[in-house]
Structures are given as structure tokens and as C-alpha cells.
Amino acid sequence: MLRPASGADALAVQALWNLAIRDTLITFNAVEKSPDEVAQAIEDHDAFIVAEDAGEVQGYAAFGPFRAGVGYAHTKEHSIMLAPSARGRGIGRALMQALENEARAQGVHSLIAGVSGSNPMGEPFHAAMGFQLVGRVPEAGQKWGGWHDLVLMQKIL
């Protein structure tokens, strides 16, 4: 089941987010999120959707501002995160489709994905969802003692 996230989802979302921070190069962030930070992120995003199965949050997708300024108002950056057990089950695709529908309803013109070049699933997933490669920023992020590229992908809605 897909539904809008609420503050009550903060602990479940925090668990997924912090797992990615701790154990993967999906994000370059190395500082784990507190429940209050996650609750604030849910509130601050223009859209924040969770996928729930058997009462457990299996993933989330969200979008918010890409850059400051009125000229960027119709371009949003999104993020998506899945529990390891949710991968390969169509949950990510369903989350992205729901997020894109919400973006269209809000008048968003394009979605930007900032994908870690060290995430082997990120670029192929986004390409399968219709995102196009628009740029690569070499050595944009640092984590675990190494430099990692940022891959920028875009989908015109």
C-alpha cells in the first residue's frame, strides 16, 4: 500500500535512511538522522510517500526544491529509498510512479535525480523509469575514505 507519510512514520523512515547512511554508498551523508530530523524532513518535502506491506514501511520516495529561487519552482529533486528486502519486488517502481503522479498534480515540470556513481542500482533504475543522464560530477562526494561521482538524471514530466 502506498500512502502519504506522516510524522508517525518518522521512526520507520529513520531506520531505512540510517541503514543507507551506515551501510551503503547510496548517500554520501555519513551522519545518521534523528527521529526529529526525519519528522521535519517529512513535513518539509513537497511530497513524501511511503510503501507499506504488512504494517511495515518498505520504502519511501519524496521530492522537494531542486534549487532556491522562483525560476526553479517547477523543477524538483527527488529521493527514493527501499528496505533491502523490498528491492526487486516492484515497490520502487510503484513509489516512483506515485511520486511522478503527485509531481504532475502539483505542476512540476521536471524531476532531478542525484544518484551516487557508487550505487550500481541507481542509474539503471532511473533509466528504466525514463530518466535521462544529464551530467556527471566527478568526485563530488566523499565517504568511507574515497571520492564518489554524482550522476545527475532528469525526467521531463
Image: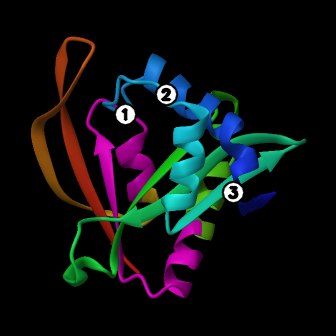
Q: Which element carries disc 2, helix, strand or loop?
A: helix
**Residue receiving disc 1:** 27
- Residues 153 and 36: in front is 36
Q: Mark 2, mark 3: which one is toward the viewer? A: 3
Amino acid carrying label 1: it is Thr
Residue shown at 58% from the left, 39% from the top: 36
Q: Which residues are magenta?
A: 99-127
Q: Quadrant of residue 96?
A: bottom right
Residue 14's place in the image compared with 40, above or below, is: above
Question: How far apart are the two marked residues, 3 and 1, measured between alpha carbons?
Answer: 21 Å
Q: Are marks 3 and 1 in contact (CB under 8 Å)?
A: no
- Residues 75 and 71: in front is 71
Q: Quadrant of residue 110?
A: bottom left
Question: How far apart are the two marked residues, 2 and 1, measured between alpha carbons?
Answer: 7 Å
Mark found first going from the N terminus, 2 or 1: 2
Mark found first going from the N terminus, 2 or 3: 3
Mark found first going from the N terminus, 3 or 1: 3
**Residue receiving disc 2:** 20
Residue shown at 35% from the left, 23% from the top: 30
Which label is found at residue 5? 3
Q: Is residue 14 left or right of residue 120?
A: right
Q: How is the image coloured?
A: rainbow
Amino acid carrying label 3: it is Ala
Q: Quadrant of the C terminus?
A: bottom left
